Amino acid sequence: MQCYCGSAKEFSLCCLPLISGQARAEHCEQLMRSRYSAYCQRNIQYLYQTYHLSKQAANSVASLAAFANNSHFIKLSILSSEQTDSEGYVSFSVRYMQQSTLYEFAERSRFVYDKAWYYIDGILNDKAPVKIGRNELCPCGSAKKFKYCVVHRLSGS
């Protein structure tokens, strides 16, 4: 299976080693991609653990789970990435669905290196949500009408 993050690599060779704890992100973009994949897999513990310690209290496991469990992630697009030894930025856009509404946002995320890479915060730019019509093609890419698309195509596939 291709990785959820859209890297065109196999999930087992891309984000899974990070999410499972077998490897650590070497770059902030790697961490960002693995966090997206963790959202797709609803791996809330990984999301929580990769927040910088100073931000964990403001991002509870319950709030992360509520968002992930109510969303179907469609696509991640990396726009740019830059880092130094101690700080990094990744600009990206994400598309996801909640019930019959399509959401899209762009973010410039900030990461810090403190013995490992951690997500700290980001500047978010939301687009207006779009209601998906029953007879429109499902935005998941399945090529089915939305009303017939019960099991949406996985992100990255």
Image (cartoon, rainbow, N blue to C red):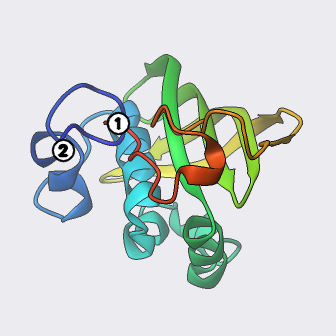
Q: Quadrant of the C terminus?
A: top left
Residue ID at (42%, 24%): 84
Q: Which residue is mark 1?
A: 156
Quarter assignment of residue 126:
top right
Distance from the alpha carbon under mark 2 to that under mark 1: 9 Å
13 vs 118, nearest the viewer: 13
Mark 2 or mark 1: name the one nearer the start of the chain. 2
Q: Position of residue 151 (x, y in %)?
A: 44, 58
Q: Position of residue 26 (x, y in %)?
A: 24, 37
Q: Which residue is mark 2?
A: 11
Tally the marks: 2
73 vs 122, nearest the viewer: 73
Residue ID at (45%, 47%): 36
Compared to residue 86, the image places residue 82 above or below, namely: above
Q: Quadrant of the N terminus?
A: top left
Q: Residue farthest to the bottom?
A: 62
Q: Position of residue 135 (x, y in %)?
A: 72, 39
Compared to residue 27, the image places residue 118 above or below, namely: below
Residue type indicated by callout 2: Phe
**Residue 88 visible somewhere in the drawing:** no
Residue type indicated by callout 1: Gly
Disc 2 on helix, strand or loop?
helix
Residue ID at (51%, 59%): 150
Q: Residue farthest to the right?
A: 128
Q: Position of residue 27 (x, y in %)?
A: 31, 33
Find out whether the residues at labels 2 and 1 contact each other: C-beta distance under 8 Å.
yes
